[in-house]
Image (tube, rainbow, N blue to C red):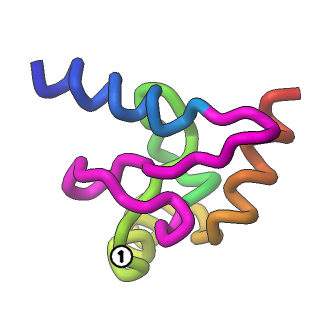
Amino acid sequence: MKALLLIFLIVISLIASEKEEIKYIVDAKNYGLVVAKDAFYVIDSHKYGTMQEYFAFAKEEDANEHVKKYGGSVVNYETYLKLQKEDAK
């Protein structure tokens, strides 16, 4: 049940259109909701999520821990959105 709820929250957090911004996203460390603009995003890591290749973290140090363990790099919200739009093409 917890896994199903997590998948639901991830899908909800990723729904965004050109006119609408993502407001919340799931923290990859504790599965709580994070204000999307305040989150730190890991891209290009060797670990893949259930629905995406990006991981969001409430704390920059958690994002950096993920990068040390699985590679990748930490980006801000604006870069994350740009990459999401490019991937959707």
**Quick check: 16 left or right of 27?**
right
Q: Residue at x 34, y 32 (%)?
A: 9
Q: Quadrant of the N terminus?
A: top left
Disc 1, SS: loop
The part of the image, by quadrant, that contains residue 69 is: bottom left
Residue 8 pos. (x, y %): 34, 23
| Residue in front for this viewpoint, 33 or 56 | 33
At 33% across and 72% down in the image, what residue appears?
A: 62
Find the residue positioned furthest to the bottom. 61
Furthest toward the front, the residue is 19
Q: Is residue 3 left or right of residue 40?
A: left
Tag 1: Cα neighbours inside 10 Å, few (<14), some, or many (≥20)? some
User: The residue under label 1 is which amino acid type?
Assistant: Lys
The percent position of residue 72, horizontal first and vertical second, equals 59, 62
Number of numbered callouts drawn: 1
Query: Residue 11: percent from the left, percent from the top?
Result: 46, 27
Relative vertical location of residue 85 with respect to residue 70 in this rendering, above or below? above
Span shown in magenta: 16-41
Q: Quadrant of residue 64?
A: bottom left
Residue 18 highlighted magenta (yes or no): yes
Check the image and report above or below for 15 versus 60.
Answer: above
Indicate the quadrant where residue 52 lies: top right
Q: Residue at x 47, y 38 (%)?
A: 13
Location of residue 82 in the rendering, given as x and y in whole percent from the top left corner: 80, 53
Q: Is residue 28 located in the magenta-colored stretch of the structure?
A: yes
Foreground of the two, 65 or 33: 33
**Residue shown at 51% from the left, 51% from the top:** 23
**In which quadrant is the C terminus drawn?**
top right
Left or right of 40? Residue 73 is right
Q: Which residue is mark 1?
A: 59
